[in-house]
Image (cartoon, rainbow, N blue to C red):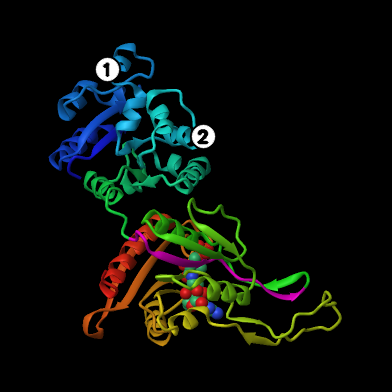
Amino acid sequence: MQNKQLLLGISGGIAAYKTPDLVRRLREQGVTVRVVMTQGATQFITPLTLQAVSGHPPHLALLDAEAESAFGHIELARWADAVLIAPATAHCLAKLAHGLADDLLSTLCLATRAPLLVAPAMNQQMWQATATQANCRLLRERGVRFCEPTTGALACGETGPGRMAEVADIIAQLSTLWRAPVLARRRVLVTAGPTREDLDPVRFISNRSSGRMGYAVAQAAQEAGAEVVLVSGPVHLPTPTGVRRLDVYSAQDMFNAVQQQLVNADIFIATAAVADYRPAQTADEKIKKTAHSLPLALERTPDILAWVSAQSPAPFTVGFAAETQQVAEYAQDKLARKKLDLIAANQVGLPGQGFDSDYNALQLFWKGADEQLEQQSLALTDKLSLARRLIQQIAHLYAQKSPE
Ligand code: PMT
Protein backbone atom coordinates (compact mmCIF):
# COMPACT_ATOMS: atom_id res chain seq x y z
CA MET A 1 0.00 0.00 0.00
CA GLN A 2 3.06 2.24 0.53
CA ASN A 3 3.12 5.26 -1.82
CA LYS A 4 -0.16 4.33 -3.50
CA GLN A 5 -2.52 7.14 -4.51
CA LEU A 6 -6.19 6.63 -3.77
CA LEU A 7 -9.13 8.70 -4.86
CA LEU A 8 -11.88 8.18 -2.29
CA GLY A 9 -15.37 9.06 -3.50
CA ILE A 10 -17.99 9.54 -0.80
CA SER A 11 -21.65 9.52 -1.80
CA GLY A 12 -24.63 10.52 0.33
CA GLY A 13 -25.36 7.75 2.81
CA ILE A 14 -25.23 7.48 6.59
CA ALA A 15 -22.21 5.14 6.32
CA ALA A 16 -20.23 8.24 5.25
CA TYR A 17 -19.57 8.71 8.97
CA LYS A 18 -17.11 5.77 8.78
CA THR A 19 -14.93 7.41 6.12
CA PRO A 20 -12.67 9.51 8.40
CA ASP A 21 -11.59 6.26 10.10
CA LEU A 22 -11.05 4.68 6.67
CA VAL A 23 -8.87 7.61 5.54
CA ARG A 24 -6.89 7.62 8.77
CA ARG A 25 -6.11 3.89 8.54
CA LEU A 26 -5.16 4.13 4.86
CA ARG A 27 -2.76 6.95 5.61
CA GLU A 28 -1.21 4.89 8.40
CA GLN A 29 -0.39 2.31 5.70
CA GLY A 30 1.34 4.88 3.50
CA VAL A 31 -1.53 5.62 1.08
CA THR A 32 -2.04 9.20 -0.14
CA VAL A 33 -5.78 9.88 -0.14
CA ARG A 34 -7.64 12.60 -1.98
CA VAL A 35 -11.34 12.86 -1.31
CA VAL A 36 -14.23 13.65 -3.65
CA MET A 37 -17.61 14.23 -2.01
CA THR A 38 -21.01 14.36 -3.66
CA GLN A 39 -23.42 17.03 -2.55
CA GLY A 40 -25.37 14.36 -0.65
CA ALA A 41 -22.24 13.26 1.20
CA THR A 42 -21.73 16.77 2.58
CA GLN A 43 -25.13 16.45 4.29
CA PHE A 44 -23.80 13.52 6.34
CA ILE A 45 -20.24 14.60 7.09
CA THR A 46 -18.40 17.90 6.76
CA PRO A 47 -15.66 18.48 4.17
CA LEU A 48 -13.58 20.00 6.99
CA THR A 49 -13.46 16.64 8.78
CA LEU A 50 -12.22 14.92 5.63
CA GLN A 51 -9.68 17.70 5.05
CA ALA A 52 -8.35 17.25 8.57
CA VAL A 53 -7.87 13.46 8.21
CA SER A 54 -6.66 13.37 4.58
CA GLY A 55 -4.46 16.48 4.71
CA HIS A 56 -6.04 17.86 1.51
CA PRO A 57 -9.23 19.84 0.93
CA PRO A 58 -11.91 17.52 -0.51
CA HIS A 59 -13.03 18.13 -4.09
CA LEU A 60 -16.70 19.01 -4.17
CA ALA A 61 -17.81 20.40 -7.51
CA LEU A 62 -17.19 19.68 -11.18
CA LEU A 63 -17.40 23.29 -12.27
CA ASP A 64 -15.24 24.93 -9.63
CA ALA A 65 -12.81 27.33 -11.35
CA GLU A 66 -10.59 27.61 -8.28
CA ALA A 67 -10.24 23.86 -7.78
CA GLU A 68 -9.68 23.29 -11.52
CA SER A 69 -6.81 25.79 -11.59
CA ALA A 70 -5.08 23.95 -8.72
CA PHE A 71 -5.72 20.27 -9.58
CA GLY A 72 -8.18 19.75 -12.43
CA HIS A 73 -10.62 16.84 -12.50
CA ILE A 74 -8.82 15.15 -15.40
CA GLU A 75 -5.51 15.40 -13.53
CA LEU A 76 -7.24 13.88 -10.54
CA ALA A 77 -8.54 11.02 -12.70
CA ARG A 78 -5.00 10.40 -14.02
CA TRP A 79 -3.38 10.75 -10.61
CA ALA A 80 -5.31 7.90 -8.99
CA ASP A 81 -3.85 4.38 -8.70
CA ALA A 82 -7.35 3.28 -7.71
CA VAL A 83 -10.75 4.81 -7.13
CA LEU A 84 -12.77 3.67 -4.12
CA ILE A 85 -16.36 4.76 -3.58
CA ALA A 86 -17.47 4.24 0.01
CA PRO A 87 -20.30 4.40 0.68
CA ALA A 88 -21.77 3.86 -2.79
CA THR A 89 -25.51 4.58 -2.75
CA ALA A 90 -28.06 2.95 -5.08
CA HIS A 91 -28.19 6.23 -7.02
CA CYS A 92 -24.42 6.35 -7.34
CA LEU A 93 -24.28 2.74 -8.65
CA ALA A 94 -27.06 3.50 -11.14
CA LYS A 95 -25.15 6.52 -12.47
CA LEU A 96 -21.96 4.46 -12.84
CA ALA A 97 -23.82 1.65 -14.61
CA HIS A 98 -25.32 4.07 -17.11
CA GLY A 99 -22.21 6.20 -17.66
CA LEU A 100 -23.73 9.45 -16.38
CA ALA A 101 -21.33 12.32 -15.72
CA ASP A 102 -23.37 15.02 -13.99
CA ASP A 103 -21.13 15.65 -11.00
CA LEU A 104 -17.45 15.46 -10.14
CA LEU A 105 -17.42 11.87 -8.82
CA SER A 106 -19.31 10.27 -11.73
CA THR A 107 -17.23 12.29 -14.23
CA LEU A 108 -13.98 11.13 -12.63
CA CYS A 109 -15.12 7.51 -12.82
CA LEU A 110 -15.56 7.86 -16.58
CA ALA A 111 -12.30 9.76 -17.01
CA THR A 112 -10.02 7.41 -15.07
CA ARG A 113 -8.20 4.27 -16.18
CA ALA A 114 -7.61 3.24 -12.59
CA PRO A 115 -9.43 0.20 -11.17
CA LEU A 116 -12.70 0.99 -9.39
CA LEU A 117 -13.79 -0.55 -6.10
CA VAL A 118 -17.23 0.21 -4.64
CA ALA A 119 -18.57 -0.43 -1.14
CA PRO A 120 -22.37 -0.23 -1.45
CA ALA A 121 -24.49 0.83 1.54
CA MET A 122 -28.25 1.32 1.52
CA ASN A 123 -31.61 0.10 2.77
CA GLN A 124 -31.97 -3.68 2.30
CA GLN A 125 -34.96 -3.36 -0.05
CA MET A 126 -33.05 -0.90 -2.23
CA TRP A 127 -30.04 -3.25 -2.33
CA GLN A 128 -32.20 -6.21 -3.36
CA ALA A 129 -34.25 -4.21 -5.90
CA THR A 130 -34.08 -5.70 -9.38
CA ALA A 131 -32.77 -2.43 -10.82
CA THR A 132 -29.91 -2.20 -8.28
CA GLN A 133 -28.94 -5.83 -8.79
CA ALA A 134 -29.01 -5.39 -12.59
CA ASN A 135 -26.77 -2.31 -12.26
CA CYS A 136 -24.35 -4.23 -10.04
CA ARG A 137 -24.25 -7.12 -12.50
CA LEU A 138 -23.42 -4.73 -15.33
CA LEU A 139 -20.68 -3.06 -13.29
CA ARG A 140 -19.15 -6.42 -12.28
CA GLU A 141 -19.12 -7.51 -15.93
CA ARG A 142 -17.15 -4.36 -16.71
CA GLY A 143 -14.58 -5.23 -14.07
CA VAL A 144 -15.74 -3.02 -11.20
CA ARG A 145 -14.83 -4.66 -7.87
CA PHE A 146 -17.34 -4.89 -5.05
CA CYS A 147 -16.86 -4.88 -1.30
CA GLU A 148 -20.14 -6.70 -0.67
CA PRO A 149 -22.46 -5.10 1.90
CA THR A 150 -22.99 -7.14 5.03
CA THR A 151 -26.25 -8.20 6.68
CA GLY A 152 -27.44 -6.71 9.96
CA ALA A 153 -29.38 -3.87 11.57
CA LEU A 154 -29.57 -0.88 9.25
CA ALA A 155 -29.79 2.82 10.07
CA CYS A 156 -33.36 2.89 8.68
CA GLY A 157 -34.45 0.47 11.43
CA GLU A 158 -34.75 -2.57 9.12
CA THR A 159 -32.55 -5.65 9.20
CA GLY A 160 -31.03 -7.22 6.11
CA PRO A 161 -28.21 -6.90 3.59
CA GLY A 162 -27.10 -3.31 2.97
CA ARG A 163 -24.59 -2.36 5.68
CA MET A 164 -21.33 -1.03 4.29
CA ALA A 165 -18.48 -3.55 4.63
CA GLU A 166 -16.20 -3.03 7.63
CA VAL A 167 -13.32 -0.58 7.13
CA ALA A 168 -10.76 -3.40 7.62
CA ASP A 169 -12.44 -5.49 4.88
CA ILE A 170 -12.46 -2.55 2.48
CA ILE A 171 -8.74 -2.00 3.07
CA ALA A 172 -8.05 -5.73 2.58
CA GLN A 173 -9.88 -5.68 -0.79
CA LEU A 174 -8.01 -2.57 -1.82
CA SER A 175 -4.69 -4.24 -1.12
CA THR A 176 -5.61 -7.21 -3.35
CA LEU A 177 -6.33 -4.71 -6.13
CA TRP A 178 -2.75 -3.49 -5.90
CA ARG A 179 -1.14 -6.89 -5.52
CA ALA A 180 1.24 -7.98 -8.30
CA PRO A 181 -0.62 -10.11 -10.91
CA VAL A 182 -0.21 -13.62 -9.52
CA LEU A 183 -0.66 -15.40 -12.86
CA ALA A 184 1.44 -13.14 -15.09
CA ARG A 185 2.76 -15.04 -18.15
CA ARG A 186 0.64 -18.11 -17.29
CA ARG A 187 -1.76 -19.72 -19.75
CA VAL A 188 -5.06 -20.82 -18.28
CA LEU A 189 -7.65 -22.97 -20.03
CA VAL A 190 -11.17 -22.83 -18.53
CA THR A 191 -14.30 -24.78 -19.46
CA ALA A 192 -17.71 -23.30 -18.64
CA GLY A 193 -21.43 -23.78 -19.09
CA PRO A 194 -23.49 -26.85 -19.97
CA THR A 195 -23.19 -29.17 -22.95
CA ARG A 196 -26.11 -30.29 -25.10
CA GLU A 197 -26.54 -33.86 -26.27
CA ASP A 198 -28.95 -34.15 -29.18
CA LEU A 199 -31.76 -36.70 -29.27
CA ASP A 200 -33.02 -35.55 -32.63
CA PRO A 201 -32.91 -32.27 -34.63
CA VAL A 202 -35.22 -30.49 -32.12
CA ARG A 203 -34.52 -32.05 -28.70
CA PHE A 204 -31.49 -32.38 -26.50
CA ILE A 205 -30.38 -33.46 -22.99
CA SER A 206 -28.67 -30.75 -20.94
CA ASN A 207 -28.50 -29.27 -17.43
CA ARG A 208 -29.09 -26.02 -15.52
CA SER A 209 -25.59 -24.54 -15.83
CA SER A 210 -25.70 -20.85 -16.81
CA GLY A 211 -21.93 -20.55 -17.30
CA ARG A 212 -21.67 -17.75 -14.71
CA MET A 213 -19.21 -19.58 -12.43
CA GLY A 214 -16.90 -20.51 -15.31
CA TYR A 215 -17.04 -17.03 -16.85
CA ALA A 216 -16.21 -15.52 -13.44
CA VAL A 217 -13.24 -17.91 -13.14
CA ALA A 218 -12.03 -16.88 -16.62
CA GLN A 219 -12.37 -13.18 -15.75
CA ALA A 220 -10.58 -13.60 -12.42
CA ALA A 221 -7.70 -15.48 -14.09
CA GLN A 222 -7.43 -12.75 -16.73
CA GLU A 223 -7.40 -10.04 -14.04
CA ALA A 224 -4.63 -12.00 -12.31
CA GLY A 225 -2.49 -11.53 -15.42
CA ALA A 226 -3.05 -14.86 -17.20
CA GLU A 227 -3.63 -15.44 -20.90
CA VAL A 228 -7.03 -17.12 -20.79
CA VAL A 229 -8.85 -19.38 -23.25
CA LEU A 230 -12.47 -20.08 -22.33
CA VAL A 231 -14.14 -23.13 -23.89
CA SER A 232 -17.82 -22.45 -23.45
CA GLY A 233 -20.97 -24.49 -23.85
CA PRO A 234 -24.17 -22.72 -25.02
CA VAL A 235 -24.82 -19.77 -22.63
CA HIS A 236 -26.11 -16.20 -22.84
CA LEU A 237 -23.18 -14.31 -21.34
CA PRO A 238 -20.82 -11.66 -22.69
CA THR A 239 -17.17 -12.70 -23.04
CA PRO A 240 -15.02 -11.28 -20.21
CA THR A 241 -12.67 -8.55 -21.46
CA GLY A 242 -9.31 -9.89 -22.64
CA VAL A 243 -10.42 -13.53 -22.68
CA ARG A 244 -10.36 -15.66 -25.87
CA ARG A 245 -13.60 -17.62 -26.13
CA LEU A 246 -14.35 -20.76 -28.14
CA ASP A 247 -17.99 -21.82 -28.37
CA VAL A 248 -18.83 -25.52 -28.35
CA TYR A 249 -22.07 -27.49 -28.21
CA SER A 250 -21.71 -31.07 -27.01
CA ALA A 251 -19.39 -32.91 -24.60
CA GLN A 252 -17.53 -34.33 -27.61
CA ASP A 253 -17.07 -30.79 -29.05
CA MET A 254 -15.77 -29.58 -25.69
CA PHE A 255 -13.37 -32.52 -25.51
CA ASN A 256 -12.07 -31.80 -29.04
CA ALA A 257 -11.57 -28.09 -28.23
CA VAL A 258 -9.75 -28.87 -24.95
CA GLN A 259 -7.48 -31.38 -26.72
CA GLN A 260 -6.53 -28.67 -29.24
CA GLN A 261 -6.08 -25.89 -26.69
CA LEU A 262 -4.24 -27.79 -23.98
CA VAL A 263 -0.84 -27.37 -25.65
CA ASN A 264 1.20 -25.00 -23.47
CA ALA A 265 -1.59 -24.55 -20.90
CA ASP A 266 -0.11 -24.17 -17.42
CA ILE A 267 -3.43 -24.47 -15.61
CA PHE A 268 -6.69 -26.23 -16.56
CA ILE A 269 -9.90 -25.36 -14.68
CA ALA A 270 -12.94 -27.53 -15.44
CA THR A 271 -15.95 -25.49 -14.37
CA ALA A 272 -18.25 -26.81 -17.10
CA ALA A 273 -21.18 -29.06 -16.27
CA VAL A 274 -20.35 -31.60 -18.96
CA ALA A 275 -23.08 -34.14 -19.70
CA ASP A 276 -21.97 -37.51 -18.33
CA TYR A 277 -24.20 -39.38 -20.80
CA ARG A 278 -25.42 -38.77 -24.33
CA PRO A 279 -28.01 -40.61 -26.45
CA ALA A 280 -26.39 -43.69 -27.95
CA GLN A 281 -27.98 -42.64 -31.23
CA THR A 282 -29.16 -39.28 -32.51
CA ALA A 283 -32.18 -39.56 -34.78
CA ASP A 284 -31.85 -37.78 -38.14
CA GLU A 285 -35.53 -36.86 -38.12
CA LYS A 286 -37.80 -35.64 -35.30
CA ILE A 287 -38.84 -38.61 -33.15
CA LYS A 288 -42.60 -39.08 -33.58
CA LYS A 289 -45.00 -39.49 -30.67
CA THR A 290 -46.26 -42.98 -31.44
CA ALA A 291 -45.53 -45.29 -28.46
CA HIS A 292 -46.74 -44.82 -24.83
CA SER A 293 -43.21 -44.80 -23.53
CA LEU A 294 -39.84 -44.25 -25.14
CA PRO A 295 -36.81 -45.98 -23.61
CA LEU A 296 -33.62 -44.00 -24.17
CA ALA A 297 -30.28 -45.76 -24.53
CA LEU A 298 -27.48 -43.54 -23.21
CA GLU A 299 -23.71 -43.93 -23.46
CA ARG A 300 -20.89 -42.28 -21.50
CA THR A 301 -19.28 -39.10 -22.82
CA PRO A 302 -15.49 -38.67 -22.69
CA ASP A 303 -14.32 -37.50 -19.25
CA ILE A 304 -12.43 -34.35 -20.24
CA LEU A 305 -11.00 -33.63 -16.80
CA ALA A 306 -9.67 -37.18 -16.31
CA TRP A 307 -8.10 -37.08 -19.77
CA VAL A 308 -6.32 -33.78 -19.01
CA SER A 309 -4.91 -34.95 -15.67
CA ALA A 310 -3.64 -38.16 -17.32
CA GLN A 311 -1.47 -36.22 -19.80
CA SER A 312 2.28 -36.17 -19.38
CA PRO A 313 3.20 -33.54 -18.53
CA ALA A 314 -0.22 -32.50 -17.22
CA PRO A 315 -1.06 -28.89 -16.43
CA PHE A 316 -2.04 -27.91 -12.88
CA THR A 317 -5.50 -29.47 -12.99
CA VAL A 318 -8.53 -28.11 -11.13
CA GLY A 319 -11.91 -29.85 -11.10
CA PHE A 320 -15.28 -28.80 -9.78
CA ALA A 321 -17.67 -31.14 -8.00
CA ALA A 322 -21.39 -30.37 -8.07
CA GLU A 323 -23.16 -32.45 -5.45
CA THR A 324 -26.58 -32.45 -3.78
CA GLN A 325 -25.41 -34.57 -0.83
CA GLN A 326 -22.21 -35.78 0.91
CA VAL A 327 -20.47 -32.92 -0.88
CA ALA A 328 -17.08 -33.19 0.85
CA GLU A 329 -16.95 -37.00 0.60
CA TYR A 330 -17.77 -37.17 -3.12
CA ALA A 331 -15.42 -34.27 -3.89
CA GLN A 332 -12.51 -35.95 -2.10
CA ASP A 333 -13.23 -39.12 -4.04
CA LYS A 334 -13.07 -37.17 -7.33
CA LEU A 335 -9.84 -35.45 -6.25
CA ALA A 336 -8.17 -38.84 -5.79
CA ARG A 337 -9.84 -40.77 -8.63
CA LYS A 338 -9.27 -38.10 -11.30
CA LYS A 339 -5.75 -37.33 -9.94
CA LEU A 340 -6.42 -33.59 -9.57
CA ASP A 341 -4.27 -30.88 -7.99
CA LEU A 342 -7.35 -29.18 -6.50
CA ILE A 343 -11.09 -29.71 -6.41
CA ALA A 344 -13.69 -27.01 -5.77
CA ALA A 345 -16.84 -28.56 -4.37
CA ASN A 346 -20.20 -26.84 -4.41
CA GLN A 347 -23.56 -27.82 -3.03
CA VAL A 348 -26.18 -27.74 -5.78
CA GLY A 349 -29.94 -28.10 -5.58
CA LEU A 350 -30.31 -25.30 -2.99
CA PRO A 351 -32.01 -22.01 -3.89
CA GLY A 352 -29.73 -18.96 -4.13
CA GLN A 353 -26.45 -20.70 -4.96
CA GLY A 354 -24.80 -23.11 -7.40
CA PHE A 355 -26.52 -23.67 -10.74
CA ASP A 356 -28.00 -20.61 -12.48
CA SER A 357 -27.50 -18.24 -9.54
CA ASP A 358 -25.34 -15.13 -9.13
CA TYR A 359 -23.99 -16.54 -5.85
CA ASN A 360 -22.06 -19.58 -4.77
CA ALA A 361 -19.91 -21.03 -1.98
CA LEU A 362 -16.99 -23.42 -2.45
CA GLN A 363 -15.08 -25.93 -0.40
CA LEU A 364 -11.58 -26.51 -1.73
CA PHE A 365 -9.65 -29.74 -1.21
CA TRP A 366 -6.07 -30.56 -2.21
CA LYS A 367 -3.19 -32.73 -1.13
CA GLY A 368 -0.57 -30.81 0.86
CA ALA A 369 2.84 -31.83 2.12
CA ASP A 370 3.15 -35.59 2.92
CA GLU A 371 -0.06 -36.21 0.93
CA GLN A 372 -2.11 -34.74 3.79
CA LEU A 373 -5.59 -33.63 2.75
CA GLU A 374 -5.93 -29.84 3.11
CA GLN A 375 -9.08 -27.78 2.77
CA GLN A 376 -10.36 -24.22 2.64
CA SER A 377 -13.94 -22.91 2.74
CA LEU A 378 -14.90 -19.93 0.59
CA ALA A 379 -18.15 -18.50 2.00
CA LEU A 380 -21.28 -17.65 0.01
CA THR A 381 -20.75 -14.54 -2.11
CA ASP A 382 -21.17 -13.37 -5.70
CA LYS A 383 -19.45 -15.65 -8.21
CA LEU A 384 -16.84 -13.12 -9.32
CA SER A 385 -15.61 -12.41 -5.78
CA LEU A 386 -15.56 -16.16 -5.18
CA ALA A 387 -13.64 -16.79 -8.41
CA ARG A 388 -11.03 -14.19 -7.42
CA ARG A 389 -10.42 -16.01 -4.15
CA LEU A 390 -10.27 -19.34 -5.94
CA ILE A 391 -7.71 -17.96 -8.40
CA GLN A 392 -5.55 -16.65 -5.54
CA GLN A 393 -5.49 -20.13 -4.03
CA ILE A 394 -4.81 -21.82 -7.38
CA ALA A 395 -1.94 -19.38 -8.03
CA HIS A 396 -0.51 -20.09 -4.58
CA LEU A 397 -0.60 -23.88 -5.00
CA TYR A 398 0.62 -23.65 -8.61
CA ALA A 399 3.64 -21.59 -7.47
CA GLN A 400 4.44 -24.25 -4.83
CA LYS A 401 4.22 -27.06 -7.38
CA SER A 402 6.05 -25.29 -10.21
CA PRO A 403 8.50 -22.79 -8.68
CA GLU A 404 10.10 -20.49 -11.28
O1 PMT B 1 -22.77 -22.49 -14.63
P1 PMT B 1 -23.39 -21.98 -13.34
O2 PMT B 1 -24.88 -21.81 -13.45
O3 PMT B 1 -22.69 -20.75 -12.82
O4 PMT B 1 -23.20 -23.11 -12.23
C1 PMT B 1 -21.92 -23.42 -11.77
C2 PMT B 1 -21.71 -24.95 -11.61
C3 PMT B 1 -22.61 -25.47 -10.50
C4 PMT B 1 -22.02 -25.66 -12.93
C5 PMT B 1 -20.19 -25.13 -11.27
O5 PMT B 1 -19.89 -24.46 -10.06
C6 PMT B 1 -19.82 -26.60 -11.14
O6 PMT B 1 -19.99 -27.24 -10.11
N1 PMT B 1 -19.30 -27.20 -12.26
C7 PMT B 1 -19.02 -28.63 -12.37
C8 PMT B 1 -20.31 -29.37 -12.64
C9 PMT B 1 -20.12 -30.85 -12.82
O7 PMT B 1 -20.32 -31.34 -13.90
O8 PMT B 1 -19.69 -31.50 -11.78
P2 PMT B 1 -19.40 -33.12 -11.76
O9 PMT B 1 -19.22 -33.38 -10.30
O10 PMT B 1 -20.49 -33.83 -12.48
O11 PMT B 1 -18.07 -33.28 -12.57
C10 PMT B 1 -16.79 -33.28 -11.94
C11 PMT B 1 -15.75 -32.57 -12.80
O12 PMT B 1 -15.52 -33.34 -13.98
C12 PMT B 1 -16.13 -31.20 -13.27
O13 PMT B 1 -14.98 -30.38 -13.16
C13 PMT B 1 -16.54 -31.38 -14.72
O14 PMT B 1 -16.24 -30.21 -15.50
C14 PMT B 1 -15.65 -32.55 -15.13
N2 PMT B 1 -16.22 -33.41 -16.17
C15 PMT B 1 -17.36 -34.13 -15.95
C16 PMT B 1 -17.84 -34.98 -16.92
C17 PMT B 1 -17.16 -35.08 -18.15
N3 PMT B 1 -17.61 -35.88 -19.12
N4 PMT B 1 -16.05 -34.37 -18.35
C18 PMT B 1 -15.56 -33.54 -17.40
O15 PMT B 1 -14.53 -32.88 -17.60
Residue holding disc 2? 98
Residue holding disc 1? 70
N-terminal of the two: label 1 or label 2? 1
344 with respect to 6 (left or right): right
- Residue drawn at point x = 36 percent, y = 61 percent: 185
Position of residue 240 relative to residue 344, above or below, is: above
The image shows residue 144 at horizontal and vertical percentages of 41, 44
34 with respect to 106 (left or right): left
- Residue drawn at point x = 42 percent, y = 27 percent: 107
Q: What residue type is labelled 1?
A: Ala
The label number, if any, that marks residue 251 in the structure image: none
Q: State the extent of the magenta-drawn residues as a range.
A: 183-200
Nearer the observer, 162 or 200: 200
Position of residue 296 relative to residue 222, above or below, is: below
Residue lying furthest top in this view? 65
Query: For numbered disc 2, what is the local secondary structure?
Result: helix
Nearer the observer, 157 or 386: 386
Nearer the observer, 309 or 131: 309
The image shows residue 251 at horizontal and vertical percentages of 60, 75
- Residue drawn at point x = 56 percent, y = 52 percent: 238
- Residue drawn at point x = 22 percent, y = 85 percent: 370
